[in-house]
Amino acid sequence: MTKTRPVIITCAVTGAIHTPSMSPYLPVTPEEITEAALDAAAAGAAIVHLHARNPETGKPSQDISLFDQFLPVIKAKSDVVINLTTGGSPTMPVEERMQPAHHFSPELASLNMGSMNFGLYEMLKRFKEFKHDWEHPYLVESDDRIFKNTFRDIAHILESCSANDTRFELECYDINHLYTASHFLDRGLLKTPLFIQSVFGLRGGIAGHFEDFMHMRRTADRLFGDGYQWSVLGAGRNQMNLGAMSVAMGSNVRVGLEDSLWDGPGKLAASNADQVRRIRTIIEALGLRVATPEEAREMLGLKGKERVNF
């Protein structure tokens, strides 16, 4: 009998892309982030990807004291793999962005594989009212914003965090990012199995067309062979259709309110768990099953939750 393939669901619970005014369901406070992460794990997410926000303003923050309010609670109440950001926000310097991953030594941390234009300004067509003073300028100014991650920045993050046996969700927004991952593999700063998170649909990165999708997959296969686990992140309206396509082709998948606020055309997702349940339904309808946290640890070569610093 053929063994059913497990699919890793990553849930990006809250992040730097969306501002709090865009959705009343976006978790902001440590308590809300804790609840959202635990609910996503209960729904089937093997990994939760976590940012923090200032609870008063909703602004993205890499303040270690904020992470310290939810990381130990999530770890104590769930076996889920915790993945911390080194991306933070495009407005932050690299030393600020990497603080939580360096300090807490998580099993997994995200890592953007290059500098890129990061345009969010088109969201202004849909959102007109904002709760906090920083939100509107943050979107307006994004047509002149670069997310900076140079080769030196990437090497610094890898050298600083890999010393703690933290492994990386390599966020690849375009084909050149795959070649950058290959470069750092050749330098010995990355090791297999790589966890390649292909990101589609953000302005400044590769789009969400089927040909873009296939080009990313073919290139990763050519560069890494069987030395990687593939996952797909479809931003915004691309989330479920690319998720379904990728799962059918052997990929893992990422969902969550960091990547998309939607649960269908014109309908805001009421929770991260709703998106996890929707993609889980697709996975199971394809005759597959969701991976447990322990299976994800084995597939990605993670060190285990007992070796984190929280």
Image (spheres, grey):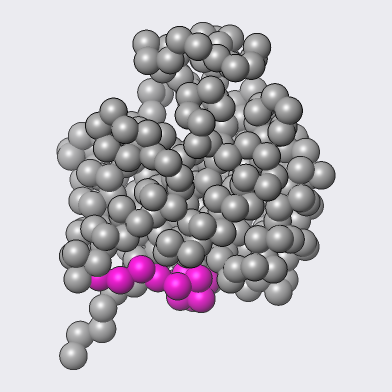
Residues in magenta? 288-299
- The reply to whether residue 94 is visible in this rendering is no
Residue 179: image location, x then y, percent:
42, 44
222 displayed left or right of 204 = left
Q: Of residues 55 and 227, which is closer to you in this image?
A: 55
- The reply to whether residue 30 is visible in this rendering is yes
- Number of marks present in the image shown: 0
Q: Of residues 197 and 4, which is closer to you in this image?
A: 4
Residue 70: image location, x then y, percent:
71, 52
Q: Residue at the far right: name it.
A: 65
Q: Of residues 300 and 12, which is closer to you in this image?
A: 12
- Relative to 233, does residue 228 appear above or below in the rendering? below
- Relative to 208, does residue 136 appear above or below in the rendering? above
Residue 59: image location, x then y, percent:
66, 27
Quarter containing the C terminus: bottom right
Residue 272: image location, x then y, percent:
46, 47
The residue positioned 48% from the left and 64% from the top of the image is 42
The residue positioned 77% from the left and 62% from the top of the image is 309
Q: Of residues 222 and 36, which is closer to you in this image?
A: 36
The residue positioned 68% from the left and 47% from the top of the image is 31
40 displayed left or right of 162 = left
- Relative to 85, does residue 145 appear above or below in the rendering? above
Which quadrant of the structure image shows residue 146? top right
The residue positioned 18% from the left and 39% from the top of the image is 210
Which quadrant of the structure image shows residue 153? top right
Quarter containing the N terminus: bottom left
Query: Is residue 123 part of the magenta span, yes or no?
Result: no
- Relative to 122, does residue 179 appear above or below in the rendering? below
Query: Is residue 294 part of the magenta span, yes or no?
Result: yes
